[in-house]
Amino acid sequence: MSHLVAGIGLRPGTGEAEIRDCLAQALTQAGVAATELGRLATVAARAAEPGLLALAREAGLALAVIPDEALAGFEASCATRSTRIAGLYGVGSVAEAAALAAAGPGATLVLPRIATARVTCALARGASA
């Protein structure tokens, strides 16, 4: 099982295709094959988003749900910072913090957050990968 996790941040109502496109861009930028991806991760507030659930189902990936309050513990490890997101979640990047949290202790960012109009994506790899 791969320890590569894609953290996804998104605006409510974002469609599956838009999320898939952002994820594909992230994998391409990191030089990582989609087959290396072990799971997706997002904040609890977005866990029921139909587009994200559809993508996880289509890709055959588990969706790790990170409690909103758990994100703040990853602030120091985040490479990017959105003031708006920091105000909402106490962390500069939902995508980065979710990826790091789901990848486990000692995880590192493989790709800092990239953003499209409605989606952010970051990649993290677990320490035991």
Image: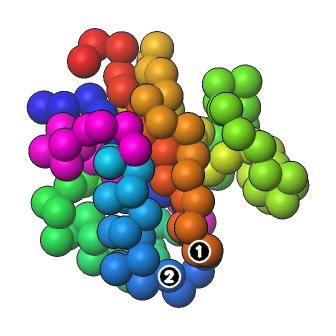
The residue drawn where x is 19% and y is 69% is 57
Q: Is residue 24 left or right of residue 49?
A: left
Residue type, mark 2 in image: Thr
The relative height of residue 24 versus residue 64 in the rendered view (above or below) is below
Q: Earlier in the sequence, mark 2 or mark 1?
A: 2
Q: Quadrant of the C terminus?
A: top left
Q: Nearer the viewer, mark 2 or mark 1?
A: 1
Q: Is residue 38 left or right of residue 73?
A: left
The relative height of residue 50 versus residue 55 in the rendered view (above or below) is below
- Give the residue pinned by disc 2: 14
- Label 2 secondary element: loop
- Label 1 secondary element: loop
Q: Which label is found at residue 118?
A: 1
Image: magenta residue range = 29-45
Does residue 72 belong to the magenta stretch?
no
- Circle 2 crowding by C-alpha within 10 Å: few under 14, some 14–19, many from 20: some
Q: Quadrant of the N terminus?
A: top left
- Circle 1 crowding by C-alpha within 10 Å: few under 14, some 14–19, many from 20: some
Residue type, mark 1 in image: Arg
Q: Position of residue 47 (x, y in %)?
A: 46, 66
The residue drawn where x is 71% and y is 39% is 80
The relative height of residue 76 versus residue 94 in the rendered view (above or below) is above
Q: Position of residue 99 (x, y in %)?
A: 47, 40
Q: Position of residue 37 (x, y in %)?
A: 23, 43
Q: Quadrant of residue 61?
A: bottom left
Q: Is residue 73 visible?
A: no
Q: Are marks 2 and 1 in contact (CB under 8 Å)?
A: yes
